[in-house]
Image: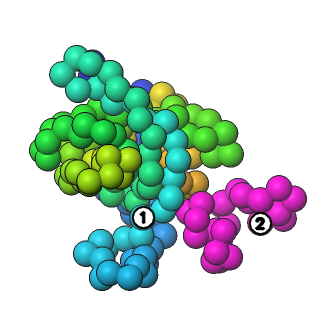
Amino acid sequence: MALAAPALEASGFPLTRAAALARLPAMKETQNEEPSHRAVERLPFQAMVTYRLEGQEYGNLAADVSENGIFIRTFLPPPVGTRLELSVRLPPEMGGFQVEIEGLVARVVEDPDPRQNGMGVQFTAIHATDAKAVRALVARIFRFDVLRRSQPATMDEEPTEPGAPRR
């Protein structure tokens, strides 16, 4: 099944990956016990992710997300290099939109504890059925945790806490 997004030239959507990344705030590496090789912080993100692989559809829970990709918990991850088509349903507090993403399995975790197994999927393209879904993905997922840490918000950002003043 090919993923497609409508042409929405007037609003500047759909965004290419490069354009979406250009709109994101700079993020710092997470301070873990072990040094991280990641250039950007991974944010906790629990959402249902459906992915298609060799004609079959699978559904698993995401564990975290960054501007570059998403980690999906799964007992039997496909091998590194596998191309996937993902559908991510954003949580209601992030708009509840369905976002279509193309990705590449970049990392596989096979732990003695199978509950820790999963795959890191690098985003190669982000599509959406409408511009609101792309805006929700770019403007909220990647800033959601940053805003909770009381970082300065941009002028066009919606408040994330009930009763928070609008800018």
List x then y, in percent, for residue 8.
46, 34
**Residue occupying the point 83% across, 63% down:** 164
Q: Which residue is mark 2?
A: 167
* Quadrant of the rendered image containing residue 13: top left
Measured along the vertical axis of the image, is residue 73 above or below residue 1? below
Is tag 2's residue or tag 1's residue first in the polypeptide sequence? 1
Quarter the C terminus occupies:
bottom right
Is 92 placed left or right of 165 in the picture? left
Q: Is residue 120 visible to us here?
A: no
Callout 1 amino acid: Arg
Residue at 40% across, 29% down: 59
Could you classify mark 1 by the number of other residues whose Cα lies within 10 Å: few (under 14), some (14-19), or many (20 or more)? Answer: many
Does the magenta portion include 157? yes
Residue occupying the point 42% across, 55% down: 65
Local secondary structure at mark 1:
loop
The furthest residue to the front: 112
Of tags 2 and 1, the one toward the viewer is 1
> Where is the N terminus found, in terms of image quarters?
top left
Taking the view exactly as shown, the residue that stands out farthest to the right is 163
Taking 137 as reference, is 70 left or right? left
Q: Is residue 48 above or below residue 123?
A: above
Q: Which residues are magenta?
A: 142-167
Q: Position of residue 53 (x, y in %)?
A: 23, 26
> Which amino acid type corresponds to the residue marked 2 in the rendered image?
Arg
Residue under label 1, please give it.
42
Choose between 54 and 109: the one closer to the eye. Answer: 109
| Secondary element at tag 2 | loop
Instruction: Decide whether the magenta segment is chiefly helix, strand or loop.
Output: loop
Residue 33 is labelled as none
Q: Is residue 145 magenta?
A: yes
